[in-house]
Amino acid sequence: MVNRILRASVPTLAVLSLICLMTVPMGAITLRFGHSTAATDKSQNHIFAVKFAELAEEYSNGEIEIKIFPSNQLGSEQDRVQKIRLQSKVMTSVAISNLAPFAESAGVYSLPYLFSSTEDVFKLLNGPFAETIQERVSKEAGLRILGYLVTDFRVLTNSKKPICKISDLQGLKIRVTKNPLRLGTFKAWGATPIPMAWSEVFTALQQGVIDGQENPIITNYANNFQEVQKYITLIHYNHWIAPVLIGEQAYGKLSPTVQLALNRAVEDAALHERAWAREYTAKALQALKDAGMEVCVPEDEEVWRDSARSVWPQFYDLVGGKDLVDEALASLAE
Ligand code: MLT
């Protein structure tokens, strides 16, 4: 009797497995996800990427496979944005100021001193303002934002001297993202800003081509900047936000169920990254101090703020127009 059941069920099972394989092919869609930091559990990009790959596979029943390419293997941040506009099987996360040269409206998030806290950031990202930005980025650059990684404010580091007031910045060569708004801000502060791709920053600091740079505490630690930088200045002019991007055309070619799985995976992995970053920033700061870095909280940050905000009008056209800036401010005031 048992044998009869077995004899009957073996072919039945084989047919069922075949049907299963045909309807849910394992790893049928392979997407390459590129990011900028090393593959370590110190990096917000990698923490996100690993969770995203796991959830994308789970939520799509194995249909989506995410291959992670850390350490700028798919090119610098701006190269990757360009790449995903042209290639269909690539995704990335980049700092918002590296998206802005391709989709100007995204630049609104980079206006210096737009946000006074991380809660402010979530107010915009979780509200209708984010939908406005999504629509505009789609039109301006053919890109879809599936979610946002969020860490903390970008802080200043340098190898020369403690910077505790704005006048200390005079003449220091500070690397900035290739974004005119960043250049304008650091010029207004009296520094000498040097636009440079993120992938080149560590070597440039090591060789003394530049004196300093600005990125969140976590990024500084994940990239071992304690080896080439001595001083940290805790400013709050800009918040690190990194959109997770895919090309609109590539996204449009996916089935609705796969789109849903991808959306859910990005959303949940971003929540995981944000919770991790909230905890990890203090640990990373302590590790930088233990490695010998000195921290200064500027006594005159309102002067930095007023000076940076004075450049806004020069850049309204570069960040989607004054109306968009007013919309952001109104959403923040709600
Ligand atoms: C940059 O400074 O270019 C970026 O903030 C690097 C990053 O995405 O971590």
Image: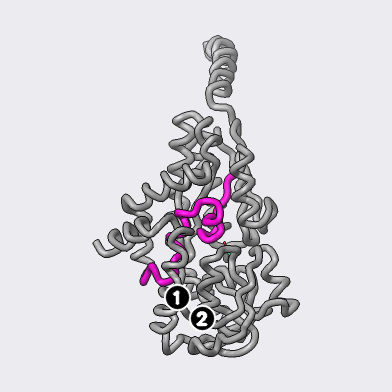
Q: Is residue 276 visible?
A: no
Q: Is residue 129 visible?
A: yes
Quarter-of-image position of residue 334: bottom left
Q: Please indicate whether residue 166 sits to the left or right of residue 225 in the image.
A: left
Reply yes or no: does residue 287 show up in magenta. Answer: no
Task: Identify the residue under disc 2.
Answer: 189
Q: Amino acid at mark 1?
A: Ala
Residue at (48, 40) in percent of width and height: 262
User: What number of labels is visible?
Assistant: 2
Q: Give the structural element (helix, strand or loop) at label 1.
A: helix
Residue 265: x %, y % from top left: 47, 44
Residue 41: x %, y % from top left: 58, 62
Nearer to the camera, 100 or 260: 100
Residue at (45, 42) in percent of width and height: 263
Q: Please indicate whether residue 145 sits to the left or right of residue 116 in the image.
A: right
Instruction: Give the answer, above or below, for where 99 lies relative to 32.
Output: below
Task: Identify the residue under disc 1.
Answer: 308
Quarter-of-image position of residue 72: bottom right
Q: Please indicate whether residue 10 sits to the left or right of residue 329 in the image.
A: right
Residue at (61, 37) in percent of width and height: 88
Distance from the alpha carbon under mark 2 to that under mark 1: 7 Å
Which corner quadrant of the figure contains ligand 1? bottom right
**Mark 2 Cα shell of 10 Å, populated few (<14), some (14-19), many (≥20):** many
Instruction: Give the answer, above or below, for where 49 lies relative to 313.
Output: above
Nearer to the camera, 199 or 101: 101
Q: Is mark 2 within 8 Å of ligand 1?
A: no
Q: Are marks 2 and 1 in contact (CB under 8 Å)?
A: yes
Q: Amino acid at mark 2?
A: Trp
**Mark 1 Cα shell of 10 Å, populated few (<14), some (14-19), many (≥20):** many
Reply yes or no: does residue 116 show up in magenta. Answer: yes
Report the span colored magenta. 91-117
